[in-house]
Image (cartoon, grey):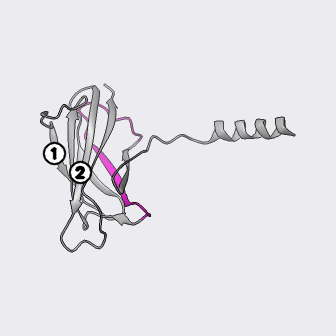
Amino acid sequence: MKYAFALCSLLVLTTIPVFAHDLEKDKNVGALFHIEPDDQPKAGVPVEGWFEIRKKGGNSITAQDCSCMVKLYSGKPKPTAKPIGEYTLSGEERVTAKFMFPSPGPYTVQLSGKPKKGSKVAFNPFQINWSVRVVP
C-alpha cells in the first residue's frame, strides 16, 4: 500500500507543470513576480512583468495604494550601483511594468514601494529583489 501511494504521488508530481513565479517578502509585504510569456526573457525583446503584491494576511496592494517603482540592475547591484532602467507600475490586482533587458546574462529586478496618502491598505515601505537570467 505504501509503495502504491508513493508511485501515485510520483506520477502526480511529474505531470504537474512547474511555474517559475517567485514569491519574495520584506517586512509585512510579499510579492509574486512573473515575466510574460514564460519567465524566460530574451535580450533586446520588450517584456511585460507583473507583480501580485500583498500585505501579510492576504490584502492586495494595488497601484492605487502604492507609490511603487521597479528598478532594473545588471547583475547583483552594489549599494552605490545605478539602475539601468526605472519603471512605474500600473494595474489593479496584478500590477505591471514593461521593460527590456539589453543583453544576455544575470539581472536584478527590484520592486520598492510605500503607501500612498489615502491608501486603503496600511503597509510598511518595502524593497524586494529577484534574480533574472536573460537568454540570447
Closest to the observer, 115 or 83:
115
Quadrant where the N terminus is found in the figure: top right
Residue 53, image x, y percentages: 35, 57
Residue, far right? 1
Q: Amino acid at mark 2?
A: Ser
Q: Amino acid at mark 1?
A: Glu
Q: Which residue is depicted at the point 24% across and 57% down?
A: 125
65 shown above or below 133: below
| Apparent side of residue 27 relative to residue 20 in the rendered image (left or right) | left
| Apparent side of residue 2 relative to residue 107 in the rendered image (left or right) | right
- Which contiguous range is marked in magenta? 38-58
| Crowd class of label 2 (few under 14; some 14 to 19; many from 20; radius 10 Å) | some
| Crowd class of label 1 (few under 14; some 14 to 19; many from 20; radius 10 Å) | some
Q: Which residue is depicted at the point 21% across and 39% down?
A: 72
Q: Which residue is depicted at the point 65% across and 39% down?
A: 13
Quadrant where the C terminus is found in the figure: top left
24 shown above or below 136: below
Q: Secondary structure at mark 1?
A: strand
Residue 55, image x, y percentages: 37, 61
Residue 45: say if magenta: yes
Location of mark 1 (residue): 86
Location of mark 2 (residue): 112
Q: Which residue is depicted at the point 49% across and 42% down?
A: 19
In the rendered image, which quarter is residue 8 located in?
A: top right
